[in-house]
Amino acid sequence: MRNFIIFGPPGAGKGTQAQKIANEFNLHHLSTGALLREEVSRQTEIGQRVQKIMDQGGLVDDSIVDAIVKNKITQDGQVAGFIFDGYPRTINQAENLDALLAAKALPLILNLEVEEKELIKRLKLRGQESGRSDDNEETIKNRLHVYSEQTRPLLDFYARQKRLISVNGQGTIEEVFQLLQDQIK
Ligand code: B4P
């Protein structure tokens, strides 16, 4: 089994690249953002609890997200590997994921580096095109703040364990995908 985490700030291209990597390398794409948005659109009990937090750009409780991920890994355990997208976002989540995968294969981290100006440009554009409720100016600012406070510290956590690979995420979608493929092969 081979596992990867696509990592980076909001708008870095995680969802975009994770989909392409999943197709190319026959991996299962597990996006916590997409799974949570599905709960919201189905108005499940979890969906009702997380909607406001997501609309404000905050992080959903570790316990909720960890349980969703554990379920998926258990259900889909026979796959060739996973690409985790948007997870982990806190040190607790990272420790939870390592515990879940310890007997299989610890994931490598593929980190997309993109400047803040470019992130804001991409997210605003997506907001105009798709109407995603958290792609508005105020929420984008909060998501970037939450990322730098709670999620970016994970880079040190993984670098210390020599599991971190960083690539320039500023190019076109195909250019970034090429850089990632070079690292995965
Ligand atoms: P996510 O769905 O993970 O949202 P995101 O960080 O904004 O990344 P996303 O994958 O959607 O965007 P991408 O960079 O690919 O999370 C949403 C919310 O869910 C969070 O704020 C939080 O509330 C909650 N949540 C999710 N996971 C959680 C967790 N583990 N713990 C707690 N809470 C959690 O792309 C952005 C845009 O850029 C796209 O429009 C794309 O087309 C464009 N783009 C991509 N690559 C490009 C390129 N190279 N050039 C130009 N544009 C590009």
Image (cartoon, rainbow, N blue to C red):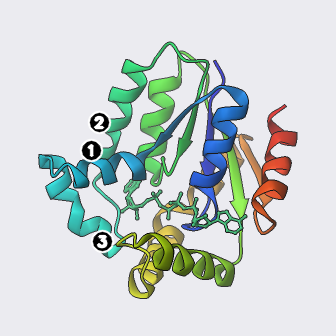
Residue 15 rendering spot, x and y as whole percentages: 57, 52
Instruction: Say which of marks 3 and 2 sits in front.
Output: 3
| C-alpha span from label 3 to label 2 | 21 Å
| Mark 3 residue's CB less than 8 Å from ligand 1 | no
Q: Residues within 10 Å of mark 2 (few under 14, many from 20)?
A: few
Left or right placement of residue 46 versus residue 109 in this view: left
Residue 73 rendering spot, x and y as whole percentages: 42, 25
What quarter of the picture does the N terminus occupy? Answer: top right
Residue 83 rendering spot, x and y as whole percentages: 59, 36
Q: In terms of image quadrants, where is residue 52?
A: bottom left
Report if the CB atoms under discs 2 and 1 are less than 8 Å apart: yes
- Residue underneath mark 3: 55
| Mark 1 residue's CB less than 8 Å from ligand 1 | no
Tell me which residue sits at (77%, 69%) in the image.
Answer: 170
Amino acid type, callout 1: Ser
Tell me which residue sits at (47%, 54%) in the image.
Answer: 89
Q: In terms of image quadrants, where is residue 104?
A: top right
- Circle on res. 63: 1
Amino acid type, callout 3: Asp
Q: Nearer the viewer, residue 79 or 145?
A: 79
